């Protein structure tokens, strides 16, 4: 009996077989499982559905221009720094706080990176590391006031917003510094190298509801990475399923599992193919994939991530459960500072200049992304993937609206309404669930 | 023919998938104290929400007759206009406002958008006198105790010309003295012609004060008993509530008391913010393996403060004293050190300090001992499900899976989840602070069974409770605390309610009588 071996603790009077039976009672058919999963994750799936709908809407309105390989690549590059910020902001909001200073921190670190690289001729790799360390230090400064002195994050980071913006302006003396060397610019604007020039069928775009293809070079490394990603996905999912089995937990219907894998695999492959039809995976895209994977893992699987949720959900209960709540909050802000620094340097690399006005309103974009992506204003709820989806909803809307010529004032009005609608939808769902 | 102030006939109320009320009848005579009791989920609160218009007319079936006329309340304002006022368990006072301001909140004295402060305070004084509250009407509500806040709520009800007063668990947060005072006030109001409906889990209070008792079970009216002059005893009520005879309210137990496990000696703690205010004074307590030890005391006696300060200094500032486990002296400066040392503290306030209400049973169960389901900081999610499922089964938490949000569970189930969380830390000593507060009789019985089992496994259990019968029924030995000091210790056979109460009030102001 494998189960008996795993459950070595002898202080229990329920035989493991009974648990297996009990849990297995919940084993149900395909439709039932699907319905349950959808219902318990209305918010998450709702946001993904919204993202798909918005994408389709603007693809139609722009007569297919939204989905050209060039534009898909640009959406990623345009939103890279916001996505980085959104991940950190999601953690801060889950922890029950807010950070208004990230735009200013991004500007300050961008400015210092500019001075170090352009004026002092430091190696850009060294600057990247030093910049992230500086961001972490700034985060530690704010985290100290928030976690240990117990000043509300709203106030500490409002002060930080002014403070670091002022410092950035002071350092740059109101001027922009640039241009950056190409190697540094590649962080935001570059692509992964190609393995060799392979000819294939390129995806051109969709117009008049038909897919346009042509013969041309495809980015081979991107295709290889796509296949590798799918393989990794299948492997981890299979392992997880096996793991559940070995504990005697229901793993869900096989057909559903296969369907899910096929669907996810197709999405990944399609995405890779579209990117490969242009210049391949942008460097910033790779950074994002790494960050999303790492932070998702942390929030879902690690003790540290679990505690971030616990502190945000009920700080007192977390404290009385042995969580070092102050330390936890402190490190969440250190992390936010580091990610803000990274975002600031990506932005500087994208502009190829450090400017004192960099990062204005970034904090608002990041906060909006987190809330659109399902965070709760009272803390304790949210996912990293949610933040990404939220940021992409806003990013695709920006891109799509610009493409079809919506004035920027109207863009703001529409984005404001979307943010409100997303959160209202959330509140409505919660209320319905309660009654 | 009896004169009924309220006649609710065949009330039915359905929520999606649940029949909360099914042909419930409730007839309340003018000028009586009518107790409404039943287990949690029996339908008491729903019935009162129907009566007060929270669930408006049309959303329920059946008929409500007030003073012989059919009533169709659309909201609380209309029911209040008819003289029906409900006081909820969680008081609806604004802590920063003064007593007088709270009494007239939403009903301000004065006119044309201006408040007449002199009139406000004058009338507040009059109402405060009626409920026996001696305080400055301009004092903020946050500065007075829970017992007095309860009186402010009643004064507020009186200001609305109340004729039918509904109190939902009014004494749940009160100490014995304040409870006795409140019950006396109810009697006094009855003599002035105010009818009351009392919802309470404390059966001794119900038998002491109620003229008649209506028992609900599973959304139905079971019976209405005439309870005047002690005609009904607690066992009779319990029988109606649970539908079966309970020979004992406590499961049988053969204590097997082992060696000395836990000692606190000379424990002294100051208030966390008020410097120099001693909250626990030179307290010493011991617990043996397999022993259930109680701490009795009135509210403010320092019981919770003693427990929490021992539990990794989670309360107050440490002044002096020593903690020993298995004879070894310990320095517990943080909660995690206390958990590692084998101590668990189950809080008295599960919603505020015990649970992550947005998260499911599984994640609540493992929070205090994540190391048991993780390796190098990575959680084994499958193992977590299995382990929490075992505890859910063992503690009989009534849900289909461990994926239920704890915020949606009943009080009894929530309490079991909190207990499970601490059992999962594999403690040697469990400190249970008010382990059965606000939960129904059936769940209480089950919790007592769990406590017995924990003791039988050789753990030590320290129980803090404001319900003396609970302490006496559960514990092998009882300490009494008063004003921060341990004033005495009684073994089970000597621990009568009178004896313990004497110790609890030792060298203190007289604190009222124990309800019979």
Image (spheres, coloured by chain):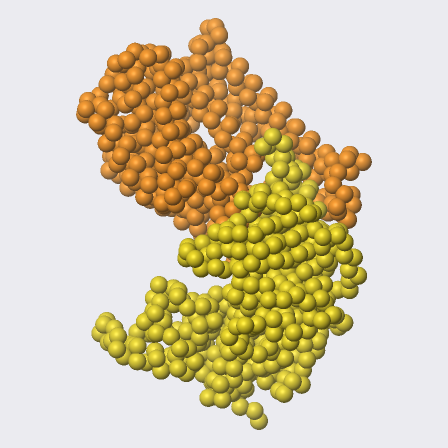
Q: Is residue A148 left or right of residue A26?
A: left
Image position of A121 (left or right of B509): left
- Where residue B23 sits, quadrant-wise, is bottom right
- Nearer to us in this view, B174 or B85: B174
Q: Residue at x 53, y 90 (%)?
A: B3
Quarter of the image for the N terminus of chain B: give it: bottom right
* Residue lying at 61% horizontally and 71% vertically, measured from the top left: B503
Answer yes or no: is residue A132 visible: yes
Write down which chain is painted yellow.
B
Is any part of residue A215 visible from this angle? no
Residue at position x 68%, y 47% from top? B327
- Residue drawn at 66 percent across, 56 percent down: B286
Quarter where residue B441 is shown: bottom right
- Percent position (x, y) of residue A172? 22, 23
Percent coordinates x, y for residue B168 in the rendering: 52, 71
> B336 above or below A401?
below
Q: According to the colouring, which chain is orange?
A: A
From the viewer's perspective, is A255 left or right of B176?
right
Q: How many marks?
A: 0
Relative to residue B342, is residue A345 depicted above or below? above
Q: Position of residue A272 (x, y in %)?
A: 48, 20
Q: Residue furthest bottom?
A: B1
What percent of the width, then of the height, locates residue A405?
Answer: 27, 31
Q: Is residue B11 above or below residue A334?
A: below
Query: Which quarter of the rendering shows the C terminus of chain B?
Result: bottom right
């Amino acid at each position: 009996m494998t189960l008996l071996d795993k459950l070595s603790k002898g202080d229990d009077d329920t035989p493991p077989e009974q648990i297996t039976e009990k849990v297995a009672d919940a084993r149900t058919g395909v439709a039932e499982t699907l319905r349950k999963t959808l219902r318990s994750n209305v918010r998450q799936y709702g946001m993904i559905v919204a993202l798909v709908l918005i994408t389709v809407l603007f693809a139609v309105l722009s007569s297919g221009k939204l989905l050209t390989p060039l534009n898909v690549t640009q959406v990623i590059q345009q939103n890279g720094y916001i996505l980085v910020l959104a991940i950190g902001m999601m953690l801060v909001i889950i922890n029950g706080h807010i950070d208004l200073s990230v735009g200013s921190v991004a500007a300050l670190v961008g400015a210092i990176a500019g001075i170090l690289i352009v004026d002092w001729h430091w190696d850009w790799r060294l600057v990247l590391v030093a910049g992230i360390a500086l961001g972490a230090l700034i985060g530690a400064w704010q985290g100290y006031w928030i976690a240990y002195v117990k000043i509300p994050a709203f106030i500490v980071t409002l002060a930080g917003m002014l403070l670091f913006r002022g410092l950035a302006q002071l350092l740059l003396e109101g001027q922009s510094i640039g241009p950056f060397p190409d190697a540094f610019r590649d962080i935001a604007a570059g692509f992964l190298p190609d393995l060799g020039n392979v000819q294939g069928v390129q995806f051109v775009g969709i117009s008049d509801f038909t897919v346009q293809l042509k013969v041309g070079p495809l980015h081979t490394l991107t295709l290889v990475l796509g296949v590798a990603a799918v393989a990794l996905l299948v492997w981890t999912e299979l392992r997880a399923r096996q793991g559940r089995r070995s504990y005697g937990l229901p793993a869900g219907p096989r057909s559903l599992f296969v369907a899910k894998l096929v669907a996810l695999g197709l999405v990944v492959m399609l995405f890779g193919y579209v990117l490969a039809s242009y210049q391949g995976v942008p460097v910033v895209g790779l950074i994002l994939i790494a960050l999303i994977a790492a932070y998702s893992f942390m929030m879902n699987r690690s003790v540290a991530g679990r505690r971030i949720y616990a502190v945000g959900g009920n700080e007192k209960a977390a404290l009385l459960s042995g969580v070092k709540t102050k330390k936890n909050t402190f490190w969440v802000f250190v992390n936010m500072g580091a990610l803000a620094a990274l975002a600031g340097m990506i932005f500087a690399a994208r502009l190829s200049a450090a400017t004192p006005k960099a990062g204005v309103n970034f904090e608002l974009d990041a906060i909006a992304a987190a809330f659109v992506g399902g965070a709760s204003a009272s803390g304790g709820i949210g996912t990293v993937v949610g933040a990404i989806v939220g940021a992409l909803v806003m990013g695709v809307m920006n891109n799509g609206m610009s493409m079809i010529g919506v004035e920027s004032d109207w863009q703001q009005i529409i984005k404001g309404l979307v943010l409100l609608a997303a959160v209202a939808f959330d509140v409505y769902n919660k209320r319905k669930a309660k009654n | 023919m009896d004169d009924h102030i309220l006649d609710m006939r065949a009330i039915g109320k359905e929520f999606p998938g649940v029949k909360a009320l099914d042909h419930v009848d409730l007839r309340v005579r003018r000028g009586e104290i009518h107790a409404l009791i039943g287990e949690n989920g029996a339908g008491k609160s729903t019935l009162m929400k129907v009566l007060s218009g929270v669930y408006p007319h049309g959303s329920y079936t059946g008929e409500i007759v007030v003073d012989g006329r059919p009533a169709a309340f659309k909201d609380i304002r209309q029911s209040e206009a008819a003289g029906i006022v409900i006081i909820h368990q969680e008081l609806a006072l604004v802590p920063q406002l003064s007593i007088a301001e709270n009494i007239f909140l939403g009903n301000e004295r004065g006119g044309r958008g201006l408040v007449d402060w002199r009139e406000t305070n004058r009338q507040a004084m009059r109402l405060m006198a009626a409920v026996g509250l001696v305080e400055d009407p301009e004092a903020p509500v946050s500065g007075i105790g829970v017992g007095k806040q309860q009186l402010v709520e009643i004064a507020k009800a009186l200001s609305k010309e109340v004729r039918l007063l509904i109190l939902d668990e009014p004494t749940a947060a009160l100490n014995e003295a304040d409870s006795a005072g409140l019950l006396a006030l109810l009697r006094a109001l009855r003599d002035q012609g105010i009818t009351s409906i009392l919802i309470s889990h404390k059966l001794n209070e119900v038998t002491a004060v109620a003229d008649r008792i209506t028992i609900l079970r599973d959304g139905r009216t079971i019976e209405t008993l005439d309870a005047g002059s002690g005609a009904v005893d607690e066992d009779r009520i319990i029988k109606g509530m649970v539908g079966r005879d309970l020979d004992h309210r406590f499961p049988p137990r053969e204590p097997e008391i082992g060696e000395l496990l836990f000692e606190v000696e000379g424990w002294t703690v100051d208030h966390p913010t008020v410097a120099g205010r001693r909250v626990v004074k030179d307290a010493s307590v011991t617990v043996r393996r397999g022993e259930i030890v109680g701490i009795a005391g009135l509210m403010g006696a320092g019981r919770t403060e003693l427990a929490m300060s021992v539990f990794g200094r989670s309360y107050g500032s440490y002044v002096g004293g020593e903690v020993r486990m298995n004879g070894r002296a310990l320095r517990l400066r943080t909660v995690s050190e206390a958990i590692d040392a084998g101590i668990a503290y189950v809080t008295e306030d599960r919603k505020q300090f015990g649970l992550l209400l947005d998260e499911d049973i599984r994640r609540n169960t493992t929070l205090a001992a994540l190391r048991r389901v993780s390796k190098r900081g990575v959680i084994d999610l499958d193992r977590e499900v299995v382990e929490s499922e075992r505890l859910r089964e063992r503690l009989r938490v009534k849900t289909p899976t461990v994926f239920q949000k704890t915020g949606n569970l009943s009080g009894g189930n929530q309490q079991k989840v909190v207990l499970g969380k601490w059992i999962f830390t594999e403690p040697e000593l469990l400190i249970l602070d008010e382990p059965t507060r606000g939960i129904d009789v059936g769940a209480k019985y089950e919790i007592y069974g769990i406590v017995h089992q924990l003791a039988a496994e050789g753990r030590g259990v320290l129980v803090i409770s404001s319900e003396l019968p609970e302490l006496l029924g559960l514990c092998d030995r009882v300490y009494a605390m008063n004003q921060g000091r341990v004033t005495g210790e009684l073994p089970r056979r000597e621990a009568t309610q009178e004896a313990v109460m004497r110790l609890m009030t030792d060298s203190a102001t007289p604190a009222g009588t124990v309800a019979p």
